[in-house]
Amino acid sequence: GLESGEFVAIRGSVWQLVSRSVELLQENPNLYQSLLKKKGDPNYINCITMDLPRTPPYLEDNSERHKILFNVLYAYSVSDSAILYCQGMSYVVSLLISVM
């Protein structure tokens, strides 16, 4: 099944291959860091901050995974002016973080 040891061991590699994340990182090596430095909309920052404690797995505010989740959502919100952030994105990103 999908939870067998063999699949779990390669799951992150499969996601990276399917998403082309390694290629995209090589093409844009400093993109993520530059997005984190941009000034975001305070209303969306507040929405992200409010959604994090409601996103499984439920974590302490200062956990490393909580910080990673915030940063990914923040970076996306400043990179896509059409969407910015919408409720529910934290669930998708949390799932992706768990398999990467």
Image: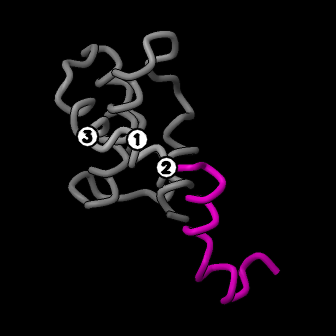
Which of the two residues, 60 or 98, is positioned nearer the viewer here?
98
Q: Name the residue under label 2.
A: 23
Give coordinates of residue 13: x percent, y percent. 57, 69
The residue indicated by pointer 1 is 27
Q: Quick check: 77 left or right of 19?
A: left
Q: In which quarter of the image is residue 31?
A: top left
Q: Which residue lies furthest to the bottom in this view?
A: 5
For disc 3, the marked residue is 30
The alpha-carbon separation of the residues under discs 3 and 2 comes to 13 Å
Find residue 91 and report its image quarter.
top right
**x, y percentage for residue 12?**
55, 68
> Where are the magenta residues, as a range?
1-21
Q: How many marks?
A: 3
Q: How far apart are marks 2 and 1 (CA)?
A: 6 Å
Dot 2 and dot 1 residues touching (CB under 8 Å): yes
Q: Which of marks 3 and 1 is in front?
A: 1
Instruction: Decide which of 45, 19 is in the foreground and name it.
Output: 19
Looking at the picture, tell me which residue is in the foreground, 31 or 57: 31
Q: Position of residue 4 (x, y in %)?
A: 73, 86
Q: Residue 53 carries which label?
A: none
Q: Does the magenta stretch include residue 49?
A: no
Dot 1 amino acid type? Glu
Say which residue appears at 37% left-offset and 25% top-offset.
Answer: 47
